[in-house]
Image (cartoon, grey):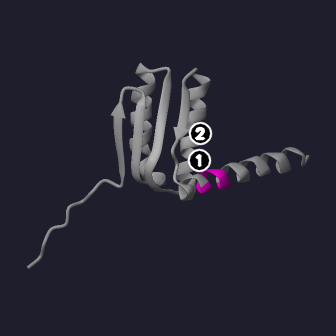
Amino acid sequence: MIRSQEVRPLVKIWRDRNFLRVGGIVVNHHFKKLQKVLEDTAREEGRIVLDLRELEFIDELGVCQLLSFIDQLSQRGIRVELINAQDKVLSKFLAVGARLWLDEQLFSKVG
């Protein structure tokens, strides 16, 4: 007998006004769902708190997209705070941030 398996969304987002809780997995092609919720929230709020406590994994492209989108929101005057990231998620943000910083430092000095 074949049983159907429940398909769960990889990224889960809960919203309470300007407070967003993100869970599951955010990889490059799933970022659009998070981006839409961030954009909807930004239309209504001047500040967004993004709680990453339940985020299990984010890939490098997901981190880059999120940081880029946060930068876009910042340019529009919307403040975004990231809180409660697990160590494995935080290490991905730190690795990407360090790489981006090094790239800028090294390549800005090359003619």
Q: Tell me residue 98's x, y (percent).
A: 72, 51
Question: Dominant secondary structure of the magenta stretch?
Answer: helix
Q: How many numbered marks appear?
A: 2
Name which residue type carries label 2. Answer: Ser
Q: Tell me residue 61's x, y (percent).
A: 55, 53
- Residue drawn at (55%, 34%) of the image: 81
Where is mark 2, residue-wise? 68
Where is mark 1, residue-wise? 64
- Residue drawn at (44%, 30%) of the image: 39
Name which residue type carries label 1. Answer: Cys
Looking at the rendered image, the quarter that the N terminus falls into is bottom left
Alpha carbon distance from label 1 to label 2:
6 Å
Q: Secondary structure at mark 1?
A: helix
Residue 8 highlighted magenta (yes or no): no
Query: Where 30 sits versus 20, above or below?
Result: below
In depth, the one of 41 and 49 nearer the eye is 49
Q: Secondary structure at mark 2?
A: helix
In depth, the one of 90 and 28 nearer the eye is 90
Residue 93 highlighted magenta (yes or no): yes
- Residue drawn at (24%, 59%) of the image: 7
- Residue drawn at (59%, 39%) of the image: 68
Q: Tell me residue 106's x, y (percent).
A: 85, 50
The extreme left residue here reads 1
* Magenta highlight range: 91-95
